[in-house]
Amino acid sequence: MASSGGSLNPSTTTSQYPSFCFSTSFTDLMSSSHEDSNWASLGGGNNGIESPKQPPTPFSPSSFLSTPTAAGFSSNQFLDSPFFPFNSNIVPSPTTGNFPEETKYSDFSFLPQTRPLSSKMEEQVKSQPQDWSTSEIQKTKSESTHQYLSDQTRLEDGYNWRKYGQKQVKGSENPRSYYKCTYPNCPTKKKVERNLEGHITEIVYKGNHSHSKPQNAKKSSSNSYNDVPIDNNHFDSSASFGEDDFEQASSLSKSGDDHENEPEAKR
DNA sequence: CGATTTTGACCCTAC
DNA sequence: AGTAGGGTCAAAATC
């Protein structure tokens, strides 16, 4: 059991799914080879969006909405790429617009102002090389003190998560928790990092749900966005991801990548 | 009673 | 080849 390590198992189970990754770093994926494939197959299998049907997803919009100015980062940024992490055009972090990693993966993140974004990012870049960057579908970092309130909502993204581990990462003093989607066969996982105060400083999603959001998620029963009819069309079909979707998504992310992230991401 | 969380150990990968 | 660090497993505890 333990011998398998874990990361390999899922890959074999999900390998049957079409590898699909929303990360704008698709190009990277292509060139990155097996490293990502590990996760790509794992999460990529269902890699669609966090919520095939529910756009709001992981970075609970409500949390953002609830914290309009909270982060101090312009809602504009959100308007551009708020609920669509897979949107290649995701705006670079307000403060860190020049972070390749950030934009590159189309994951948008929020960092608490309490800690220097740059340093944080650096840490990520350093401690989390390619396998994560390429595989991570969405990266969310909460920002400002309001994140505390958002914590719940963010975790309650409409899916049921089960914590399967916790670690104290070297780069930061923040403990990192590992969650798995409780839905059978759903390879989706997420890492949640909290600061000393218990506030979420970062959330990283891996893989995509191979199922639609549970109607009555235990934890997210109160999520109003649960039924937010956001246009998620391209990904909506995630339930039956085919090449079309794949290409669409890939091209999407690709174009976006090429457009804004390429130059910077290159380095 | 079942599901989830906690926690230490183990495994894998990168350096 | 060894070490460090991250990620996952799994038994026990808790809810």
Image (cartoon, coloured by chain):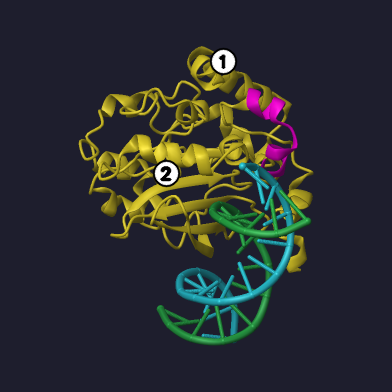
Chain colours: A yellow, B cyan, C green
- Disc 2, disc 1: CB below 8 Å? no
| C2 w.r.t. A28: above or below | below
| Chief secondary structure of the magenta portion | helix
Relative vertical location of residue A100 with respect to residue A240 in this rendering, above or below:
above
Q: Position of residue A181 (x, y in %)?
A: 56, 56
Q: Which mark is nearer the camera, 2 or 1?
A: 1
Residue A108, compared with residue A154, is above or below; it is above
**Rendering coords of residue B6 (x, y %):** 46, 74
- Nearer-N-terminus badge (2/1): 2
Residue placed under numbered mark 2 in the picture: A227
Residues A262 and A259: in front is: A262
Q: Which residue is mark 1?
A: A255
| Mark-to-mark CA distance, 2 and 1 | 30 Å
Residue drawn 73% across the image and 27% down it:
A243
Q: Please, what secondary structure does the residue beneath circle 2 have?
A: helix
Query: Judging from the image, what secondary structure is the residue with disc 1 in?
Result: helix
User: Looking at the figure, which quarter contains the N terminus of chain A?
Assistant: bottom right
Q: Is residue A246 magenta?
A: no
Query: Is residue A138 visible in the rendered structure shown here?
Result: no
Question: If the image is split into quadrants, where does the C terminus of chain A sit?
Answer: top right
Report the magenta residues as a range.
Answer: A27-39
Q: Is residue A240 visible?
A: yes
In the picture, measured across the screen, residue A188 lies left or right of residue A122, that is: right
| Residue at the image position 77 percent from the left and 65 percent from the top | A3
Residue A32: within the magenta? yes
Q: Amino acid at mark 1?
A: Ser
Q: Chain of mark 1?
A: A
Q: Position of residue A196 (x, y in %)?
A: 31, 59
Identify the residue at horizontal 71%, vertical 25% (top origin): A31
